[in-house]
Image (cartoon, rainbow, N blue to C red):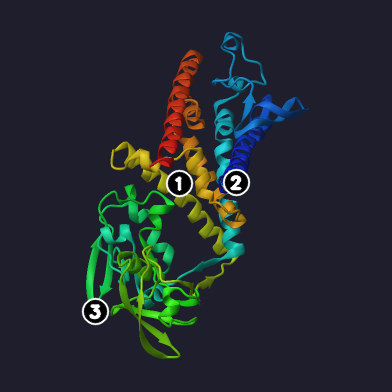
Amino acid sequence: MDGLIMALQMILALSIIVGIHEFGHLLSAKLFGMKVEKYYIGFPPKIFSFNYKGTEYGLGSIPLGGFVKITGIIDESMDTKHLNKEPEEWEFRSKPPWQRLIVMLGGIIFNVITGLIIFTTMTYSNGDTYLSKDEINKNGILALKIGKDVGFQTGDKILKINNEDWERDSDLFDPNLFFNDNTSFEVLRDQSLVKITLPNNFINQMNSREALSSFLKARTPFYIDSVFTDDNAYKAGIIKGDKIIKVDNNEIIDFIELKNILEENKSSLVQLTLSRNNKNIDKVVEISRDGKIGIRVMNEKVNFSKKNYSLAESINIGTERAFGIVFINIKAFGKMFSGDIDPSKNLSGPIGIAQIFGSTWDWGNFWRIVGLLSMVLAFMNLLPIPALDGGHATFILYEMISGRKPSEKFLEYSTRFGVIILLGIMSYVILNDIYKLFI
């Protein structure tokens, strides 16, 4: 069921994003009097279609994209015999370069507009809910596996990032920190200042939800919500409402700290220091063979901060967040081509995209990811690879600057080459997705 929910979210998101992208091409083509033969969401075989003003609009049964067919574009769908004929006035290839450029960039422009609208709307309607620096540093951070590996310790209080102050929990997970070299954290540890520097290309370790959840988190106090009758905690005299504050004189705050200690001391006796009615009491309890003592816990209420924004502020912040995604992708591609980061760990296909949505349907999260993917699609299509919008735009810009139009044969063969590249990339990311499912 979880997989079905993820798949349905991905299909709906891609249908929206690609549908808007192709509509950008369609609208700009019709604006300049070009003939648009087809506009489809999904790929054939078709489920249904209808004709309106000379264009066939349809829904395909393969819901992983869509397409628009504009007469006269030299792409993978064009009948090459058509190249031998003189272009008609309604064909793409008969139009002036500036019009053709706008048509090729139409999908990208519509995706960018979509991303801006989504991020601006979400910022204006929801504002920001976050854990502040003061709230996190009240109990310090919990260093998880990846965090420990780079030098963090549980209880550290993060004072500065790259010698600058920080405001909220999302600042600790800014992708720029993981892409940049020599990212440093100044932490307070046992009344001493400690500097922690992330290794270069740390993004190779922080490339999934699982990795992010193995880095750092705020320590959250907890209390015992229930005790299982006749289990070890019950026999030791532990009751509902108790707070475990020490295990064998080791201070703990977060339940993960307790869980780790229990896992490390299976089938052993430990002394728990409990806070009960504002008094501390000690209880000795036996840990079972599976690392449990028979309790269910609840986290204490966390003091989240809430910040709302005006429409003008939301437009500014939404724009910054939308284009921040593009800049991160530029950094990622640059580091992939330089060999600094591993493509196998940082590229995702359909399976990886579906996993981003998660196994529950949350409309807020859904639209946030649609906005993110819309900006990613805009960036990817802008790459100067033949067969992509960016490749077509590159050839048109060459024509506008040099005054010489590339031959139609050259465009035909370069498009074929581009399709081969894209098929190779698609095959790689899909196989990589499948491989990652089994490791």
Report the front residue among 276 and 41.
276
Q: How far apart are marks 2 and 3 (CA)?
A: 48 Å
Left or right: residue 167 compared with residue 3: left
Q: Mark 2 points at which residue?
A: 9
Q: Position of residue 160 (x, y in %)?
A: 31, 68
Q: Distance between the residues labelled 1 and 3?
A: 40 Å
Report the front residue among 376 and 409.
376
Q: Mark 1 points at which residue?
A: 326
Q: Position of residue 240 (x, y in %)?
A: 50, 81
Instruction: Report the amino acid beneath label 2.
Output: Gln
Instruction: Report the amino acid beneath label 1.
Output: Val
Q: Nearer the viewer, mark 1 or mark 3?
A: 3
Instruction: Report the amino acid beneath label 3.
Output: Gln
Q: Is residue 33 visible?
A: no
Q: Position of residue 231 (x, y in %)?
A: 45, 73
Is 227 drawn above or below residue 390 in the view shown? below
Mark before the other along the chain sequence, 2 or 3: 2
At 60% from the left edge and 41% from the top edge, which residue is drawn? 11
Element marked by disc 1: helix
Element marked by disc 2: helix
Mark before the other along the chain sequence, 1 or 3: 3
Asked if the residue under mark 3 is in contact with the one under mark 2, i.e. CB atoms within 8 Å, the reply is: no
Badge 2 crowding class, 10 Å Cα cut-off, few under 14, some 14 to 19, many 20 or more, is many
Q: Name the residue under label 3.
A: 191
Badge 3 crowding class, 10 Å Cα cut-off, few under 14, some 14 to 19, many 20 or more, is few
Is 85 drawn above or below residue 395 in the view shown? above
Is 54 drawn above or below residue 190 in the view shown? above
